[in-house]
Image (cartoon, rainbow, N blue to C red):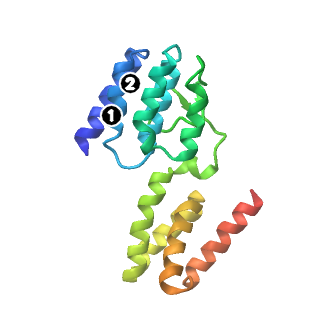
Amino acid sequence: MTTARQSFRAFGRKVICDPENVSLHSARLASALTFAGTEPVQGALADFFFACQRADASIKQEVLASVRNRLRPVAQRWFEPYVGTSSFPSCCTMATRWSVLVCTSLDVPRRILRCSADDSRRLVAGAVDAWRKGEESAQEAFLEHCCVCRDTLAFMLARRIIIKERGELPPRWRAVCLSLQQAVLTS
């Protein structure tokens, strides 16, 4: 993993120095594809669309097609309108923490600013495993994360598994569920 991260970061530095170089962006995207999750790919793609605004539409379409299977459907729809245009915002919801040329927009759910969907999905596996083993401290750490970060995605994914296996939530989990519901209603 370290070499993949180092490679991705090295391509990021090269992209900063030569932002309109399509080949560098393609190599960076290929490097992003070695990571689990969608966030690195989406961030690198946002950088490509921003820096290579004047690139031919066929090149943009080809780059988008090369990573399409790694993007969430909603992210694919975000990028598609920019294939045929020569503009891309410098601050947008398509950027991620992995972007080096484009800033992430604050016009996203609060949870995304604190932790990505990829992070949330990773946390779920550990939380469910802790629940199955009865590890109270690990469960409490997960529930605290969900409350502090308002990570409703992680909580709901874990909740679904627990309800499927047990039929109901344990008392502490029910309390966090109510707390998260209240937070959504008041925000």
* Tag 2 near tag 1, CB within 8 Å: no
Q: Residue 37: x and y, percent?
A: 41, 49
Q: Mark 2 and mark 1: span between their CA atoms?
A: 9 Å
Left-right relation of 56 to 15 = right
Left-right relation of 48 to 29 = right
Left-right relation of 175 to 137 = right
Q: Which mark is residue 25?
A: 2
Q: Is mark 2 on a helix, strand or loop?
A: helix
| Residue at left offset 64%, top offset 44% | 108
| Residue at left offset 61%, top offset 29% | 81
Nearest the viewer among 2 and 45 is 45
Q: Residue 152: x and y, percent?
A: 59, 62
| Residue at left offset 43%, top offset 73% | 128
Disc 1 residue type (three-letter):
Ala
Q: Residue 44: x and y, percent?
A: 43, 32
Nearest the viewer among 78 and 176 is 78
Q: Which mark is residue 30?
A: 1
Nearest the viewer among 58 and 174 is 58
| Residue at left offset 51%, top offset 80% | 164
Disc 2 residue type (three-letter):
His
Q: What element carries label 1?
A: helix
Q: Name the outermost residue toward the left.
A: 3
Instruction: Indicate the quadrant where residue 176 lies.
Output: bottom right
How many discs appear? 2
Instruction: Indicate the quadrant where residue 77 lies.
Output: top right
Q: Name the outermost residue toward the right.
A: 186
Considering only order in the chain, which callout, 1 or 2, is on the residue closer to the N terminus?
A: 2
Is 67 rendered above or below residue 101? Answer: below
Whether residue 101 is visible here, answered yes or no, is: no
Q: Quadrant for the C terminus, please.
A: bottom right
